[in-house]
Amino acid sequence: MSSTDESSLSLEEKQYEFCGHSLNITMLKGAFLGFSARTLSDGLFLCRYFEDEKFNFTGKKVLELGSGTGIVGILAVLLGGDVTMTDRAIVLKQIEHNVSANIPVTSRHRSKTRALLWGTDQNNFPTDFDIILGSDIVYNPSQFPGLIETLLHIANEKTTIYLSSDVKYRGGRRFPRCTPAKEV
């Protein structure tokens, strides 16, 4: 990144509290990250769900799709999971910054960040994840086929998938409201 690019960046920091953990999340504004530069309500909803349901990810191998700021994956690590946080390559620096700021050094070995372009490079990932997470990742219908292809490759018959999204309006279209299910 050139110094010109860096000077156009601004940082926005927000604090969140989930499951007894204080999270300081930094968002890189002006970095061409789009939705990935924000902590969206669907990610916060999923974190609150983990808190309400008293989730314990200990011993679980977790994959987060479209990690963005990393808040969901970071919480899963703090709750004991071995978590791989994924997004486009351009977003990984933001995730890594937030991992360093929020996960103690003694637990960082349970977190990884990797680039993943749905429908393209999912074959570079194992198929033994216990849990797949995603928040606000289904906002562009043109990406659905790649997402489905990725899920079909990575998930197995024992994988549990938790997706959180408000798809009422996406891509200029109105989607029907669905009743949320307790288990996926």
Image (spheres, rainbow, N blue to C red):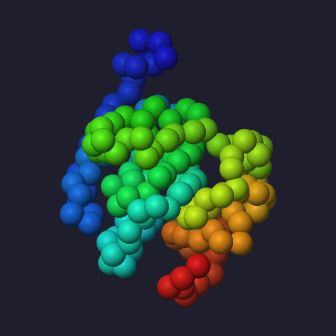
Residue 51 position by quadrant: bottom left
Residue 143 position by quadrant: bottom right
State whether residue 60 appears in this view. Answer: yes
Task: Choose between 68 and 160: the one closer to the eye.
Answer: 160
Task: Choose between 133 and 30: the one closer to the eye.
Answer: 133
Above or below 152: residue 113: above
| Quarter in which the C terminus is drawn | bottom right
Q: Taking 23 as reference, is 38 left or right?
A: right
Q: Taking 165 as reference, is 4 left or right?
A: left
**Residue farthest to the front, as pictured:** 59
Q: Taking 92 as reference, is 141 left or right?
A: right
Task: Choose between 118 and 111: the one closer to the eye.
Answer: 111
Question: Residue 110: where, in percent of width, then height?
Answer: 43, 46
Question: Residue 23: where, in percent of width, then height?
Answer: 26, 51
Question: Residue 61: where, in percent of width, then height?
Answer: 53, 57
Above or below 166: residue 83: above
Above or below 140: residue 114: above
Residue at 56% across, 64% down: 131
State whether residue 177 appears in this view. Answer: no
Question: Residue 178: where, in percent of width, then height?
Answer: 58, 84
Task: Choose between 59 and 177: the one closer to the eye.
Answer: 59
Residue at 53% across, 57% down: 62
Residue 29 position by quadrant: top left
**Residue farthest to the top, as pictured:** 3
Q: How many numbered marks appear?
A: 0
